[in-house]
Every structure is written in structure tokens, then in C-alpha cells.
């Protein structure tokens, strides 16, 4: 499912979330409020794009055979991904009311934990949507 949009839907969220992590790191370590504000909005865009891509992943999950290794792997990927997005959403909401959307030490650590969870989920489950559960037919 997703056809020609799949590469965009799969590649955009991690790119945006990585960019948000870089901006937030610069804002937190360097103390530059501009980078914190940019990181805040890029985090929002990355989380929104990730939520849209998750809907595609959910459709892919239901297309997999019920008791297959691919389905178990995709379910694990989805649960870790949702947990990580929840952490990032909490950080985003906590930063919404601060001046220049600054990220403090505690929020930064929770944000890094969310980014790490997304990285682990992507590493663990990234090949799943590309697998075809049907047996391959070789042409002789």
C-alpha cells in the first residue's frame, strides 16, 4: 500500500526527527533560543509526518499473515514506535508553554529517549513493510 508515496512517507519522518534532535542539541548545549524554537517546530512536523506514515504501516500490518514472523516483528516495531512518539509528543506539549520553546535538561533527556526508541524501532522493523508475504515465483 502507498505505491509511489511510500519512499516519501517512510523517509521524511526520521529525517525531520533527526533534524529536530540536531536543532534541540544546538539549542540546549549552545543556549541559543532560536535553535530551540526551530527544533520545537521541526519536532512537531516530524511527529505529524510519523503519525501519517504509521497509518500506512497499520494497513501493511493487517496485510501480513496472522501468525507470521513478519507480523510479530511489525507489531513490535509499531508498539515501540507509538511509545516513542508518545514521549516526543509529551516533550512537545511541555515545551509549548515555555519562552522560545526551550528544552530543559529533563525534557532533553526524555526527547533523546524518544529519538532512540524511534531509531531502535526503525532498525528493528524497517524491512517489514517491504517484505512480500507471498512465496516468490522464480521464472525458469
Image: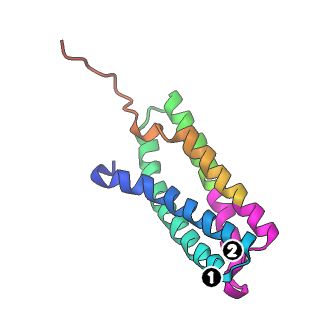
Is the C-beta separation of discs 1 and 2 under 8 Å?
yes
Q: Is residue 11 above or below residue 43?
A: above
Label annotation for residue 34: 1
Helix, strand or loop under label 1: helix
Find residue 69 and report its horizontal and vertical position in percent. 53, 28
Find residue 37 and report its horizontal and vertical position in percent. 62, 80
Residue 67 in view (yes/no): no
Which quadrant is home to the C terminus?
A: top left
Question: Which residue is painted at 53% across and 40% down in the image?
Answer: 125
Q: Is residue 34 above or below residue 56?
A: below
Residue sitting at the far right: 106
Rate crowding at label 2 as few (under 14), some (14 to 19) or many (20 or more) other CA atoms within 10 Å. Answer: many
Q: Within the image, what quadrant is residue 90 found in?
A: bottom right
53 or 117, nearer to the observer: 117
Type of secondary structure dominating the magenta stretch: helix
Helix, strand or loop under label 2: helix
For the record, the magenta segment spans 83-111
Question: Which residue is painted at 70% across and 70% down in the image?
Answer: 91
Q: Is residue 83 above or below residue 24?
A: above
Q: CA distance from mark 1 to mark 2?
A: 7 Å
The residue pinned by badge 2 equals 27
Residue sitting at the far bottom: 99
Amino acid at each position: 500500500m502507498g505505491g509511489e508515496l511510500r519512499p516519501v512517507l517512510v523517509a521524511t519522518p526520521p529525517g525531520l526527527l533527526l533534524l529536530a534532535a540536531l536543532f534541540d542539541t544546538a539549542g540546549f548545549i549552545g543556549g541559543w533560543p532560536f535553535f530551540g524554537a526551530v527544533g520545537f517546530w521541526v519536532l512537531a512536523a516530524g511527529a505529524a509526518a510519523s503519525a501519517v506514515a504509521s497509518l500506512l504501516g497499520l494497513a501493511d500490518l493487517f496485510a501480513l499473515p496472522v501468525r507470521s514472523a513478519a507480523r510479530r516483528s511489525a507489531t513490535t516495531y509499531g508498539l515501540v514506535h507509538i511509545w516513542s512518539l508518545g514521549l516526543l509528543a509529551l516533550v512537545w506539549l511541555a515545551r509549548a508553554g515555555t519562552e522560545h520553546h526551550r528544552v530543559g535538561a529533563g525534557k532533553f533527556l526524555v526527547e533523546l529517549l524518544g529519538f532512540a526508541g524511534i531509531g531502535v524501532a526503525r532498525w528493528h522493523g524497517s524491512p517489514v513493510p517491504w517484505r512480500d508475504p507471498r512465496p516468490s515465483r522464480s521464472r525458469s
